[in-house]
Amino acid sequence: MTLRSVITGSGSALPKRAVSNAEMAEMVDTSDEWIVERTGIRNRYIAGDGETTSSLATEAARRAIEAAGIEAASIDLIVLATATPDQTFPATATIVQHNLGCNGGIAFDVAAVCSGFLYAMATADSMLRTGMARRALVIGAETFSRILDWDDRATCVLFGDGAGAMVLEARDVDPADPAAPGLLGSRLHADGAHNQLLYVDGGVSTTQSVGKLRMKGREVFRHAVTNLASVLQEVLGQSGHTAADIDWVVPHQANYRILDATARKLGLPAEKVVVTVDRHANTSAASVPLAYDTAVRDGRIQPGQLVMFEAMGGGFTWGAALARV
Ligand code: COA
């Protein structure tokens, strides 16, 4: 028998206010046609007064806990991925922990921008398999609308707010059983040489301000497809699977063209790729668990299936993970 991290529940949350491309065109010089053609985005959700990264994270976490059928008090680890925390410190994970009433365990944030959920998942997985915790909440939550430059049409149309969460539980499984559930492999990477292609132009230690998101979209696009295709192959190699074994890919929802180009590079049919970027836009660290939860709840992803998660973001950082759900 071997200890594996098994996904036992998922949940997600969105702000109340949906903003269409037509509404964006009233704010900046853009059009529904341009946004749909270049990105596949049709809609995004924008947090209003009182909606914060921690409030969205808490709502997503509650739904994941309910889906897992467990008591919130039994959670002994929270890893929350975000680039838009409620406060500079303490970690947003500790606010969520208190909201859920599971005080006393481990709780911390992970900063890897759009790859944050993959980083959080791999961290929680390591801690569960070494016995530091038994029951983890892994959350991706963002209010990116608050670091967007609403005068920059090249970036403000691309992002949205939201949260997604998963309960991961340490379970003893028979590794020889191909149907045994759990995380089968994961790989993470970072290359700090590309800071200036996707970054926020402010921060505590430099400007003492929050700053705004800046991006060279075309260059990011090029790196994303190459890095994602490569890390997906690494995870397949690590777990002894091939692309043909994958039932679903749940990618970071940045841009439909990136999802499509990455799937093509691996020879994966478009029908196996979960796409929610049209509805949610790019929600950074929230996008992978938000897309996963959407596809679980609408019945696309079924128990026993093999699911590949992947993301790439500022840093650059990128990663992938394979799980039997
Ligand atoms: N509406 C209308 N026109 C726009 C626009 C908008 N919202 N944003 C940019 N444009 C214009 C530009 O000004 C430019 O005009 P010009 O040719 O007159 O100078 C033209 O469209 C092309 O801009 P460019 O940036 O070269 O477009 P692109 O084909 O590279 O598409 C992105 C832009 C951002 C959609 C694309 O590069 C992309 O998706 N990159 C990846 C970004 C990403 O996903 N980042 C997050 C990773 S975590």
Image (cartoon, helix red, strand yellow):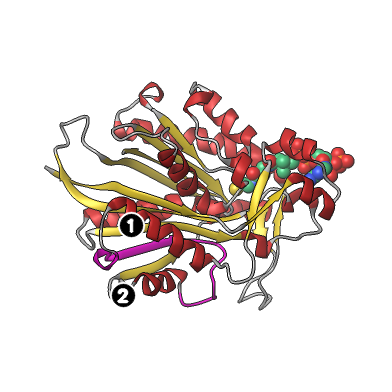
Mark 2 Cα shell of 10 Å, populated few (<14), some (14-19), many (≥20): some
**Residue flagged by tag 1: what amino acid is it?**
Ile
Q: Which residue: 40% across, 72% down? A: 99
**10 Å crowding of disc 1: few (<14), some (14-19), many (20+):** many
- Name which residue lies at 70% across and 60% down: 148
Q: Which residue is mark 2?
A: 103
The residue tagged with tag 1: helix, strand or loop? helix
| Vertical comparison of 308 with 84: above or below | above
Q: Is residue 148 left or right of residue 227?
A: right
Whether the magenta-drawn stretch holds residue 239 is answered as no
Cα gap from disc 1 to disc 2, whole angstroms: 15 Å
Label drawn at residue 264: none
- Range drawn in magenta: 72-90
Q: Position of residue 28 (x, y in %)?
A: 83, 52
Q: Residue at x 63, y 72 (%)?
A: 203
Q: Are marks 1 and 2 in contact (CB under 8 Å)?
A: no
In this rendering, does residue 218 appear at all?
no
Asked if residue 74 is among those painted magenta in the image, a careful observer would answer yes
Point out residue 50 in the picture as x, y percentages from the top left corner.
59, 71
Q: Quadrant of the C terminus?
A: top left
Residue type, label 2:
Asn
Q: Which residue is mark 1?
A: 65
58 to 101, vertically: above or below = above
Residue 85 falls left or right of residue 210? left
The x, y position of residue 81, in whole percent, is: 47, 59
Q: Which residue occupies the extreme right position in the image?
A: 29
